[in-house]
Image (tube, grey):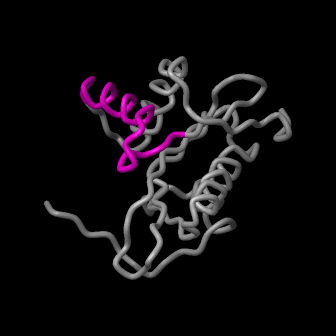
Amino acid sequence: MSTSKVKIRPLVPSDEADWRRMWRGYLAFYETELPEEIYASTFARLLGDDPQDFTCLIAEHDGKAVGLTHFLFHRHAWKVENVCYLQDLWADSEVRGLGIGRALIEAVYDAADQAGNPTVYWLTQHFNSDARKLYDRIGVLSDFLKYQRP
């Protein structure tokens, strides 16, 4: 398979089955399961036009949906412009190593640049070593640690 056959495009309503398959894979990697109402509301929000909602891009390889990313823009107290949070990133196991993740991240970078919001950030868990190899090449590891309410 060749990375030249990768196409990044916005989510459309007919992607629901592929989106669910890929997002389930993403959530399973993080040992998480969600109720049906979350799948339904998330998919509806991804297709909505509320500026507070997030966006989904789909990666296709040879015409098949093989990856996704969810991202959103939000205000930041230290900046005038919004910043972009890349929330989820997934590539099917059979296409890993073909540049799908890089293409999705670069598409988010492009969307952020077009919106005038050049800051893009994301989180991952320390054990996600395969993804971190890509992240170390395409991003900069910050010194911040994440805390959340128990």
Residue 23 placement (x, y as % from top left): 45, 33
Comparing 118 with 87, the one in front is 118
Verify whether residue 49 appears in magenta.
yes
The C terminus - image quarter? bottom left
Identify the magenta region: 35-56
Q: Give the farthest residue toward the left.
A: 150
Q: Does the segment drawn in magenta span residue 94?
A: no
Q: Position of residue 10 (x, y in %)?
A: 59, 35
Does 104 appear above or below 92? below
Residue shown at 53% from the left, 65% from the top: 120
- Side of 32 relative to 125 (left or right): left
Q: Quadrant of residue 100?
A: top right
Q: Quadrant of residue 20?
A: top left
Q: Quadrant of residue 141?
A: bottom right
Q: Is residue 90 above or below residue 72?
A: above
Quick one: 26 or 116, which is closer to the camera?
116
Residue 92 in the image: state x and y as whole percent.
60, 33
